[in-house]
Structure formats: structure tokens, C-alpha cells
């Protein structure tokens, strides 16, 4: 230790004072991944503006996208969700490794946690397909819901999990009720499950199958098993559409070749006709980007808002 670190009495000027209290367990960021990340994703994730007086913990869970005996998406989500419950976090924020967050996402998470703590909500993104479709679902089995404009809060019956906030009170109820299973020697509670069933009816000589995704299946379980009620959110159990999609958090869906979806301007049909309110600059930037990609002049005109609030699509 350098001599200039001591005072005449022989004691150090600086002292290490250990914090005996527990760290804040406000939000866990869970990222299921194969191990590959595009640079665009990394820059968007770690370039976020962090609010003042913020606390979070990151958990990256690797999954194998090729072999079913390794971690499937549902298994990776279960590992993360189990840890969020065990460590007593307040919120779990899922970010998929192919979902690019827009700037300001963390600020909006913080704002909603403080002022409008909906127990389960997500940002907006589209399918990785041409044409791309918005992952906004109301009546299951009837395709995507389209009666909304960018910037709206849209109430739905299901959520995608690529940019999604979940109050851990919901997960705790499901954790307590779920069956145990073992993955790679670790005992987990099955909170998420990818539906994949087949049966044969000997009486009718008919066979049937059920398949789907772990995100919509989780949302159905929350509704059917009355998880909102059990977790202390009875007002959401009464809603026909209890989940929220905040379309002002417009994420891009990226593939391994760097193509970002929607890539053919499918979002243009959701531009509002009159660009007003708190999301005026957000919508203007989106439309300018669309015009640039389609070799069109920037024609966006911002108008003064009468009310600084977004439409709530109930």
C-alpha cells in the first residue's frame, strides 16, 4: 500500500464500510438466448438511458435452439422465472435475444411501474415474416387485432414475451401451484410450458393434436386459473382483455442476417392520421424512417395536441 494512503497515526484515510442490508430487488431482466447476439441488439440493450435511483439485476439464460433435450424457450423462461420468485423480485422484464429495444424503453418501464403498474404488459413488435404481422392478439384463434394506431395502449387477451413486464406476484402464485420437473439436474416449477399434445379416441377412431407457443399458453393459464385474483389484482381478472400492449414501445424483430421486421413498411397502416400528443415526435420519426426506406419525401406535419395523453384501446 503506498505511503500516501496513511496518516501520521498509521491509519488509512479511507475505510471500507460493508453494507449489511439486502440489495434492492426491484426488477430482474431475463434474457433467454442461444448465445448469439447481433450488434444492433447489444447497442440497443446496453445503450438505454437508465433512470435515477434505479436498481435491476440481469439474468442471461442460454438455450439450445436445435436440440429438444437442451433448454427450450419454455425451459429458459422457467429457469429465469423461478429465480425471480426465489430472490423475491418485484418485477421480471423479459427481453428476447432477437428483439431490439427502442431508446427510452427503460424510462418507460420505470414510469409505468411508478404511475400505472399493470401486472402484465408488453411492448409492440411484429412477426419475423413477409408480410410481417403485429403480435397484438384479442380473440385467440382469429389472427392479429388491427383496430389501433401507433402510440396507443391496447388491451389484449395475450402477450408475446419478447419485451414483456410481469409482476412477480403473478409468478409466485403460479410457482406455488405448479408441478416440479427436472432440467439438467435442476428442480424447477413449470410456470411456462409449450403446449404439444396428441391423443387418440378409441371410440370415435379419431386423433387430435394441440400445439402452440409458451407465451400465449401462459396468458391463457393466468386467465383460466384466476391468477390475477389470487395474486391480488381482482380488477384485472374481471377484464375481458386483461393484458396491455404499449405500442409506443415499438421494437424491431431481427434475424441472424440483420434483417429487421417489419421490413416492407407494414407498420405504415398503423400510423395515426393526426400526429398529436406526447407521442408526436415518436410517430414522426417512424414515418420519416418509413418514407426513407420507400424513397418518399418526408411529409410529416406535427400538430399541436389538445390533450397530452394516448388513446386507450379498451
Image: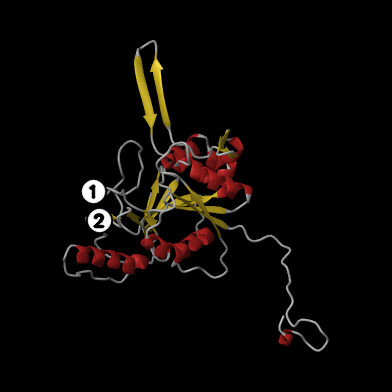
Q: How many circles with numbers are drawn on the protein?
A: 2
Residue at the extreme bottom: 8
Side of 4 relative to 294 (left or right):
right
Residue 141 lies, in percent from the top left, at 33, 35
Residue 87 lies, in percent from the top left, at 63, 51
Question: Which is more N-terminal, label 1 or label 2?
Answer: 1
For the residue labelled by badge 1, is the local secondary structure a helix, a strand or a loop? Answer: loop
| Residue with the mark numbered 1 | 130
Side of 311 relative to 25 (left or right):
left
Q: Residue at x 50, y 68 (%)?
A: 50
> Does the residue at mark 2 contact the one at mark 1 (Cβ under 8 Å)?
yes
Q: Label 2: few (<14), some or many (≥20) within 10 Å?
A: some
| Residue with the mark numbered 2 | 263
Between residues 20 and 229, which one lies in front from this camera angle?
20
Residue 68 lies, in percent from the top left, at 44, 37
For the residue labelled by badge 2, is the local secondary structure a helix, a strand or a loop? Answer: loop
Amino acid at each position: 500500500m503506498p505511503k500516501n494512503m496513511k496518516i501520521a497515526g498509521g491509519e488509512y484515510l479511507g475505510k471500507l464500510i460493508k453494507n449489511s442490508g439486502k440489495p434492492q430487488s426491484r426488477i430482474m431482466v431475463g434474457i433467454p438466448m442461444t448465445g448469439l447476439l447481433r450488434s444492433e441488439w447489444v447497442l440497443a440493450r446496453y445503450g438505454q438511458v437508465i433512470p435515477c435511483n434505479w436498481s435491476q439485476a440481469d439474468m442471461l439464460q442460454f438455450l439450445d435452439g436445435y436440440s429438444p433435450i437442451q433448454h427450450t424457450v419454455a425451459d429458459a423462461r422457467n429457469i429465469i422465472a423461478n429465480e425471480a420468485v426465489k430472490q423475491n423480485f418485484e418485477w421480471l422484464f423479459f427481453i428476447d435475444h432477437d428483439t431490439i429495444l427502442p431508446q427510452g424503453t427503460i424510462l418507460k418501464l420505470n414510469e409505468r411501474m411508478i404511475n400505472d403498474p399493470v401486472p402484465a404488459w408488453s411492448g409492440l413488435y411484429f412477426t419475423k415474416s413477409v408480410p410481417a404481422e403485429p403480435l397484438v392478439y384479442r380473440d385467440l384463434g382469429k389472427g392479429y387485432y388491427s383496430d389501433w394506431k401507433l402510440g396507443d395502449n391496447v388491451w389484449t387477451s395475450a402477450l408475446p414475451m419478447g419485451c414483456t413486464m410481469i409482476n412477480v406476484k403473478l409468478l409466485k402464485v403460479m410457482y406455488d401451484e405448479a408441478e416440479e420437473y427436472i432440467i439438467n439436474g435442476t428442480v424447477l416449477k413449470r410456470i411456462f410450458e409449450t403446449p404439444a399434445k396428441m391423443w387418440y379416441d378409441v371410440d370415435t377412431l379419431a386423433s387430435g393434436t394441440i400445439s402452440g407457443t409458451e407465451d400465449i399458453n401462459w396468458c391463457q393459464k393466468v386467465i383460466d386459473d384466476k391468477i390475477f385474483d389470487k395474486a391480488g389484482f381482482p380488477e384485472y381478472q374481471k377484464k375481458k382483455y386483461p393484458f396491455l400492449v404499449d405500442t409506443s414501445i415499438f421494437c424491431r424483430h431481427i434475424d441472424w442476417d440483420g434483417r429487421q421486421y417489419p421490413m416492407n413498411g407494414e407498420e405504415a397502416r398503423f400510423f395515426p392520421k393526426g400526429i398529436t400528443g406526447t407521442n408526436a415526435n415518436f410517430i414522426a420519426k417512424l414515418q420519416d424512417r418509413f418514407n426513407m426506406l420507400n424513397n418518399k419525401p418526408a411529409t410529416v406535419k406535427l400538430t399541436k395536441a389538445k390533450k397530452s395523453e394516448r388513446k386507450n384501446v379498451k
